[in-house]
Amino acid sequence: MKKCILLGLLLSCFLGNSQNYYMATPQGFGAAATGGGNATPVTVTTYTAFRTALNSTTAANAVILVSGTIDCSYTSVTLNNKTIIGLPGARLRNTQITVGNSTTSANNSGIINIKPGSNNVIIRNLIFEGPGAYDVDGRDNLTADGCTNLWVDHCEFQDGIDGNFDNKGLTDNVTISWCKFTYLKAPIAGGSGGSADHRFSNLVGSAASDFPTDGRYSITFQNCYWAAGCRDRMPRVRNGQIHLVSCYYNSGLSSARAIGLGGGNQGTTCYVENTSFVNVSNVYTAYPADGGTVAINYSNCLNLGSAANIGTVPLPAYTTTPIPVGQVAAFLTDATCGAGATLQVTSAGVVSPSSCTLATTDFETEKILTFYPTVVEDTLKIAFSDKGFGKCGITIFSVTGQKVFELSKNINAGDLLELNLENLSKGTYIGKVEMNGKTENLRFIKN
């Protein structure tokens, strides 16, 4: 009886599994981030209280709730086992800038710099507002300069003086999900760096010799939106292992340059899937002066123009839940539930599952796949229709809940996938196939 109950529960979970604006936990390279866990939250409404909470080491774990608008100075801090969540409408703002005095501008700009030695950090539902783009080697709205296991989710980054959100130094294992990057203020010309329009959003690796301990920045950009005003660095990468999944580009600038890759000392790879590019003259820009090797692959993307695969990029080993590429734009730009600081958070810091479920069409309607036989001797076959293509994740469980098989594979329309299951013991198995934000459930008997 216990096995039957567990089987029913697992099937219920799979059948109810659909892509949602709310994510309980991160997917991708930053999946290990747990932040402050269930620590009792402290609410801050002033910069003094916010800085004190960031620097506090009195507890092993901490959850900080930001309420209202807080005007910040540049804050460089070591964070460990901390979660920072914005209550609805929360904003961290630094609009200090002195045009004509580059030293003052650089020192006063920026909001948070996460220092080396940081680990296990979650930042959610915050608006970061900078003073506007000005090329003086200023600070970013958010810089991860040495943080491992970082999840930044449902944040909006506006008008960073140097950049919106950069990752460099020893930072590694990062997931950036449901974030919006934008420039709402006109760029300021005349900076010492020489660019009259420095609306450059996201840098990964500050030089060819800049990389984390294992050699490459492992970063997932999931369901991210590069919006009005972004001109460049979406992202610009050196020494990176980058995965862009279900992202949307529409800055309103036809001259915008989206992805820029340089190899650096360790080489760079980028896997782009289910991503839509609009009003982008250069989907991909190469930076050979960085040296090293570069590879980029596109899977199921829209409006690529002349961009083409370079080399071979292995699929990430983890499983994500992509949004169907034709629906990416609508979901990410939704004012209530889309990318940005759109989470519903209670005064106690509880992030509520959104009512905005992505209404993707199921497999049955789309006729994406069929599987057979239902009684397996050695091989389970999955046949994909002409609508079934993209990255496919397959997971199979025993009725006791033990994972017994997992595969991530890029599928072409019309493929027949044969899974060798001869090593499985006799019995009943359940599983799921995930593709393009949709899930098909499996149930079969191994003979």
Image: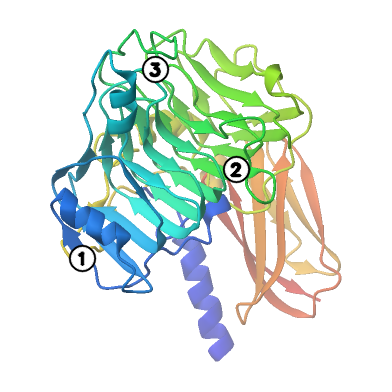
Task: Give the distance between the C-alpha atoms of the residues marked 2 and 3, in whole angstroms.
Answer: 52 Å
**Which residue is label 1 attached to?**
42
Q: Earlier in the sequence, mark 2 or mark 1?
A: 1
User: Which mark is drawn over residue 410?
Assistant: none
Q: Quadrant of residue 340?
A: top left
Q: Quadrant of residue 24?
A: bottom left
User: Would you say 221 lies left or right of 430 here?
Assistant: left
Q: Residue at horizontal 53%, vertical 58%?
A: 31
Identify residue type, mark 1.
Val
**Label 3 crowd bin: few (<14), some (14–19), many (20+), radius 10 Å:** many
User: Would you say 443 lies left or right of 11 here?
Assistant: right
What is the secondary structure assignment of the residue under circle 3?
A: loop
343 and 128: which is toward the camera: 128
Q: Residue at horizontal 44%, vertical 9%?
A: 194
Asked whether residue 226 appears in the rendered view, the answer is: yes
- Location of residue 251 in the rendering, given as x and y in whole percent from the top left corner: 39, 18
Identify residue type, mark 3.
Asp
In what quadrant of the picture does the C terminus appear?
Answer: bottom right
Q: Residue at horizontal 39%, vertical 11%?
A: 197
Q: Measured along the vertical axis of the image, is residue 372 above or below residue 236?
A: below
- Location of residue 161 in the rendering, given as x and y in whole percent from the top left corner: 34, 25
Asked whether residue 351 appears in the rendered view, the answer is: no
**Which residue is label 3 attached to?**
135
User: Which mark is drawn over residue 367?
Assistant: 2
Farthest residue to the bottom: give it.
1
Q: Earlier in the sequence, mark 2 or mark 3?
A: 3
**Label 2 crowd bin: few (<14), some (14–19), many (20+), radius 10 Å:** few
Identify residue type, mark 2.
Lys
Q: Residue at horizontal 33%, vertical 19%?
A: 102
Task: Give the distance between the C-alpha atoms of the residues marked 2 and 1, in whole angstroms.
Answer: 49 Å
> Viewer-nearest of labels 2 and 1?
1
